[in-house]
Image: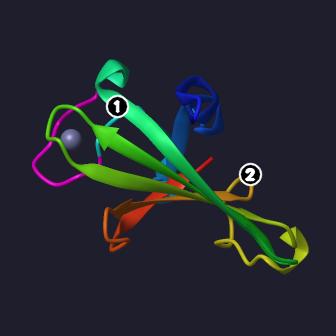
Amino acid sequence: MTDEEDLRDEIPSYAYISLARRGMEKISLDQCFLKNCDNNDPKLLEPFKKEEFDNDKEQIRKIFIRCKKCEGIFILKLKTLKQIAKFTKESDEEPLSMGLVYALDEDENNLGHIGYF
Ligand SMILES: [Zn+2]
């Protein structure tokens, strides 16, 4: 059995969205990223599976989450870049941690780049 609490620990609490010259906005990852769902209650979000991939450039973790409000499943894809020197970040922003968060739907269609963690 998968330990839900362990999976929860794998999910960063927040992601940061770059607002061009207005700095960074912090958003909670305790929310459902599926369309037409406004669930932001962690109690209604149930992480149930993890997949992990690793190569010499990046580490990818996918956390599968069931939303008990819309009954949908979405995936948080956490990508950590290993070769920071080769990562070209946008010119004049503050240094970011080299983690990227994406949301995917159940069929792994990309719902969008959420931000950085
Ligand atoms: Zn939902």
Residue 16 position within the rendered picture, expressed as x and y whole percent measured from the top left: 53, 45
Q: Nearer the viewer, residue 55 or 88?
A: 55
Whether residue 28 is visible, yes or no, is: no
As displayed, is residue 62 above or below residue 24? Answer: below
| 114 magenta-colored | no
Please give the range of residues in magenta.
33-40
Q: Label 2 belongs to which residue? A: 97
Q: Which amino acid does the dot numbered 1 rest on?
A: Leu
Q: Nearer the viewer, residue 22 or 33?
A: 33
* Residue lying at 17% horizontally and 41% vertically, measured from the top left: 71
* Residue lying at 23% horizontally and 52% vertically, measured from the top left: 34
Q: Which amino acid does the dot numbered 2 rest on?
A: Ser
Tell me which corner region of the image, top left, top right, bottom left or bottom right, holds residue 107: bottom left
Q: CA distance from mark 1 to mark 2?
A: 26 Å
As displayed, is residue 112 above or below residue 1? Answer: below
Is 39 positioned to the left or the right of 95 in the image? left
Tell me which corner region of the image, top left, top right, bottom left or bottom right, holds residue 44: top left
Whether residue 33 is visible, yes or no, is: yes
Q: Quadrant of ligand 1?
A: top left
Residue 45, labelled with which disc?
1
Indicate yes or no: mark 2 CB to ligand 1 under 8 Å. no
* Residue lying at 74% horizontally and 78% vertically, measured from the top left: 88
Residue 53 position within the rendered picture, expressed as x and y whole percent measured from the top left: 71, 68
Give the main secondary structure of the magenta stretch. loop
Is 25 positioned to the left or the right of 100 in the image? left
Q: Nearer the viewer, mark 1 or mark 2?
A: 1
Residue 62 position within the rendered picture, expressed as x and y whole percent measured from the top left: 55, 57
